[in-house]
Image: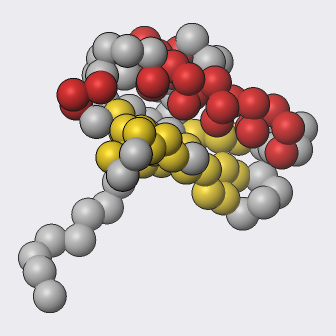
Amino acid sequence: MTLRLGPELIKMGRVSGDGGVFFLVTDIAVKPSHQGKGYGRKLMEKITEYLRREVPAGSFATLIEDKPADRLYAQFGFQPVSPGSEGMYWRQLGGL
């Protein structure tokens, strides 16, 4: 999902997954000059609508957040996985 004002990209976000059990909310971003104007909330409203419509019962949607964005995501039902689980990541180092 994206929003442009003319040629300028203001916000973006996407959901990917296996179509059955696991879904990942990624690339949630609002251009710094447009932050604090409710665009992040609108983006999460649209993503949450999509998840409610498309994700089968019993499936998971996950995301990795940077603080203080956790407060925004919590308003849409996302919860920390700890202490029962911990998130992990792998990062490719170096360049091609």
Return the x and y of residue 86 as percentages of the image width and height: 43, 36
The residue at the far right in this view is 57
> Compared to 10, does 92 lie above or below?
below
Query: Measured along the vertical axis of the image, is residue 59 above or below residue 65?
Result: below
Residue under the point 49% across and 41% down:
3
Looking at the figure, which quarter contains the C terminus? bottom left
Dividing the picture into quadrants, the one containing residue 35 is top left
Where residue 87 sits: x, y (%)? 42, 41
Q: Position of residue 56 (x, y in %)?
A: 88, 44
Q: From the viewer's perspective, tell me whether residue 42 is left or right of residue 39.
A: right
Residue farthest toward the front in the current orientation of the protein: 6
Q: Is residue 46 shown left or right of residue 87?
A: right
- Residue at horizontal 69 percent and vertical 52 percent from the top: 22
Whether residue 79 appears in this view of the structure is: no
**View extreme (left): residue:** 94
Q: Answer with left or right where residue 11 lies relative to residue 53.
A: left
